[in-house]
Amino acid sequence: MILFLSIVKALAEVAGLALIGQAVVAAFNPMKRHENPIYKLFALLASPVNRVVRIITPKLIVDEHVPFVSFFFLLLIWLCATAGRIYFLKYVPVAGA
């Protein structure tokens, strides 16, 4: 279980940092951000999360705001995975020890 939570935590970190990187690149060059290869790489890494969040969120949320919602969704997943790892490491006894 700890391995599963570690993998979930790592995937949330990668996608979250991709969203942060995408925002930083967009802040430096907002008009031509879609032509930037680094921006495209970050968008590629974050696109699965953005697609899932677009499906589960109501249509009231504008498409431009989906990355922000995705980031907070990933933050929630990361916090839950971290709390789960702490719980299992602290309170669940290891078999064979």
Image (cartoon, grey):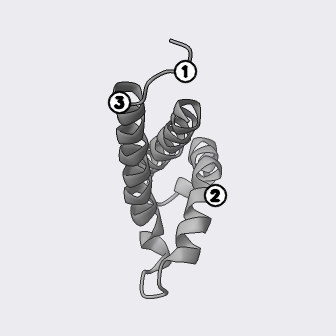
Q: Residues within 10 Å of mark 3 (few under 14, many from 20)?
A: few
The mark nearer the N terminus, 2 or 3, is 2
Q: Is residue 68 left or right of residue 8?
A: left
Q: Position of residue 4 (x, y in %)?
A: 58, 37
Numbered disc in front, either 2 or 1: 1
Mark 2 or mark 3, whichever is nearer to me: 3
Amino acid on which disc 2 is placed:
Pro
Q: Residue furthest bottom?
A: 60
> Residue extending furthest front?
96
Vertical comparison of 3 with 51: above or below: above
Indicate the amino acid at tag 1. Ala
* Position of residue 89 measured from the top left corner of the image (x, y, whole percent): 40, 26
Give how far across and how far down residue 51 sits, in percent. Answer: 61, 67
Residue under numbered circle 3: 91
Q: Report, in whole angstroms, how far the alpha carbon at label 2 lies from the one at label 1.
A: 36 Å
- Mark 2–mark 3 Cα distance, whole angstroms, equals 34 Å
* Location of residue 38 by image quarter: top right
> Which element type, helix, strand or loop, lies under badge 1?
loop
Front-lying residue, 92 or 80 = 92
* 10 Å crowding of disc 2: few (<14), some (14-19), many (20+): few
Tag on residue 86? none
Which quarter of the rendering shows the N terminus? top right
Residue topped by disc 1:
95
Outermost residue on the top side: it is: 97
Q: Are marks 3 and 1 in contact (CB under 8 Å)?
A: no
Name the residue that disc number 2 marks. Answer: 48
Q: Which type of secondary structure does the marked residue at label 3 adopt? A: helix
Residue type indicated by callout 3: Tyr
Q: Is residue 72 above or below residue 97?
A: below
Image quarter for residue 52? bottom right
